[in-house]
Image: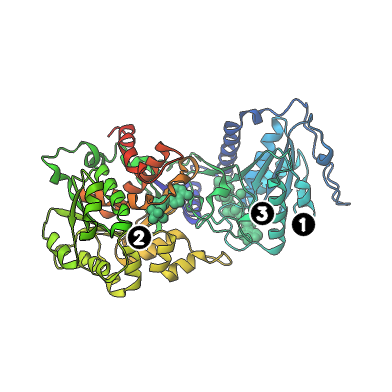
Amino acid sequence: MTELLTAAQMRALEAAAIASGAVTGLELMERAWQGVVAAIFEEWPDFAVATEGGAAPQTDFYDAKHGLPPRYLDQDESSAWRAVVLCGPGNNGGDGFVVARLLHDVGWAVEVYLYGDPARLPQGARLNYERWCELGVVTPLDHKSCEWVGTPTLLIDALFGTGLTRALPDDLQGIFRIIAGLVTAPYHPRYRRCVAVDLPSGIDADTGKCWAADFTSVIRADLSVTFLTAKIGHFLGDPFSLGKLVVKPLGLPGEPFLERGFHNEPPQDRRVKLVDQRLFGKATPILRNRLGKAISWNKFDNGHALILSGGIASAGAARLAARGALRIGAGVVTVGCPPAALMVQAAQLTAVIVRAVRDAAALDAVLADARINALCLGPGLGLGAREAALVATALARRREPRATVLDADALTLIARDAALFDLLHGDCVLTPHAGEFARLFPDLAAKVAEPATKGPTYSKVDATRDAAKRAGCVVLFKGPDTVIAAPDGRCSINAALYDRAAPWLATAGSGDVLAGFITGLLARGFAPMDAAETAAWLHVECARSFGPGLIAEDVPEELPKVFRALGL
Ligand SMILES: NC(=O)C1=CN([C@@H]2O[C@H](COP(=O)(O)OP(=O)(O)OC[C@H]3O[C@@H](n4cnc5c(N)ncnc54)[C@H](O)[C@@H]3O)[C@@H](O)[C@H]2O)[C@@H](O)CC1
Ligand SMILES: Nc1ncnc2c1ncn2[C@@H]1O[C@H](COP(=O)(O)OP(=O)(O)O)[C@@H](O)[C@H]1O
Ligand SMILES: [K+]
């Protein structure tokens, strides 16, 4: 998996690299802008050479004294393409000045705006500001000049990056709103692309929250170019304002640390990983074996999962979970249902065993079979006294606690009854969506929902971590940015975003399949955190492999194809 960084961790790594003498701050900035420009030209190769308009018109027609706008307003289409670079008061702005220079060198008509006092720019940014001043003017960015930004072919947002840690002042909020409105207005044919340096200005790099009034006043990017590795905030909040995310190396001596972990590892509860295909890489042969190539003598070597079903009307949800558990590799899957639903379930299920589980006493008897090593309660279970007793029985510690997934109705029951919550143990996995999370942890959900007005802000990562600690078990908080946390502080994000976007996965019943996937992996002996991460990643892979039109029933059926593609 890939490490995601906080702004502070990124700064610490940069500072360590500079202190070691391996690189200077200016060199880092050079590498950053090289990365930005390379990413722009890779994304839009025709941007590498400006149009045939010949020499780019210089931007020396800004009349500061009279506050006249630059002449771009009457620039005709045959002249060089117009780029506007918005620079901020820190190193993000420093990157902007250099990008401006390079675009100018390849023939763009470049206009540079600066928010802040040039005399107070940090050293490297100041130097690049001065270099730009040899080529063109810098227009102070204020409520008036921001109107002149207009609709350029290319807008570079280098106002704020990882250094934004407090709410934007009112004047800046107004400026943001105006520019965001200008560049996203559909009636402006000239507007082509917007590139955010590091991340769209206004977004908190740690939490993905928005320091502007709201996400509509963030300048939406088509491309965000970040450095070294993505930041946590790239995957939370409203990642749709980031467009495509590209990570460019900085050539730091310790860069391979991302493969191995930090040299000076921060504590577990300060690290966040991105779940990715490295789960199945060479480094994890055990995982590969467990999923695909393990030698088993009989089906019980691969575990026996028991999934409890609700009554006739809601029995389908458990079937989806059962199919998921079976496809992901549980050796045996049993659906336990109320006697009245027996016929319905038996008529629908073939490879899955069906048995009646009338009540908690019946469940107790079923659990005497020690081969049943993973349970799943919740999908379509129901919310009555019988179901609450089933949850209590499944969680009771009289016997060795079993790996147990609690989803859907089981989460609502636990939220209603503190005694049930107290029965949670370290082999449980809770899989709430946002509504269920708010029922279980109302205070944490309220903190996540708070707008960013003063730092430090509180994110879905923070909330999931706190929830896992409080529950004493793994919590998987669903969404396009699924966050998974363990009570010991381990935390990861499984993102269905950017090149892994699969919005069609938000379809009725897909969460039931996910619960089944986790249960199946638990049955195969995966530890709860590994099971949750692996299942969440495969769930999205199935959706991507199938494509739009997916319904929940398709998700488990796509798994063999995904396994084959992984070489399992
Ligand atoms: N530090 C380095 O060596 C490198 C930094 N890089 C770039 O530098 C960025 C980080 O630079 P900085 O740490 O200077 O931070 P930023 O450039 O993101 O912003 C910091 C500046 O914004 C001001 N500011 C913060 N919150 C504000 C608010 N609410 N309203 C108004 N002003 C506010 C601060 O006073 C400071 O002047 C990264 O995002 C990246 O783009 C890259 O060039 C790679 C190398
Ligand atoms: N925009 C999205 N892109 C990708 N996956 C999503 C998106 N929104 C939700 N999901 C995923 O879809 C599943 C929905 O589960 P859930 O909310 O429990 O619905 P249900 O109960 O109907 O199955 C979860 O795994 C969640 O992470
Ligand atoms: K930016």
Q: Where is residue 291 shown, x and y percent of the image?
A: 24, 41
Q: Are marks 1 and 3 in contact (CB under 8 Å)?
A: no
Q: Earlier in the sequence, mark 3 or mark 2?
A: 3
Q: Nearer the viewer, residue 220 or 205?
A: 220
In the picture, the disc for residue 408 is 2
Q: Where is residue 410 shown, x and y percent of the image?
A: 31, 64
How far is disc 3 from disc 2 in space, using C-alphas? 48 Å
Against 555, is 561 above or below?
Answer: above
| Dot in front, 1 or 3 | 1
At x 11% / y 41%, what residue is drawn?
298
Write down the residue under mark 3: 89
* Amino acid identity at mark 1: His
Query: From the image, which quarter does the N terminus lie in?
Result: top left
One can see residue 549 in this view:
yes
Q: Where is residue 433 shown, x and y percent of the image?
A: 41, 58
Q: Nearer the viewer, residue 179 or 549?
A: 549
CB at disc 3 and ligand 1 closer than 8 Å: yes
How far is disc 2 from disc 1 in space, using C-alphas? 49 Å
CB at disc 2 and ligand 2 closer than 8 Å: yes
| Dot in front, 2 or 1 | 2
Q: Are marks 3 and 2 in contact (CB under 8 Å)?
A: no
Write down the residue under mark 1: 143
Q: Earlier in the sequence, mark 1 or mark 3?
A: 3
How far is disc 1 from disc 3 in space, using C-alphas? 16 Å
Query: Which quadrant would residue 476 be assigned to in this image?
Result: bottom left
* Amino acid identity at mark 3: Pro
Q: Nearer the viewer, residue 241 or 406?
A: 406
Query: Dot 1: few (<14), some (14–19), or many (≥20) neighbours within 10 Å?
Result: some
Query: From the image, which quarter does the C terminus lie in?
Result: top left
Q: Where is residue 312 shown, x and y percent of the image?
A: 29, 57
* Amino acid identity at mark 2: Ala
- Tag 3's secondary structure? loop
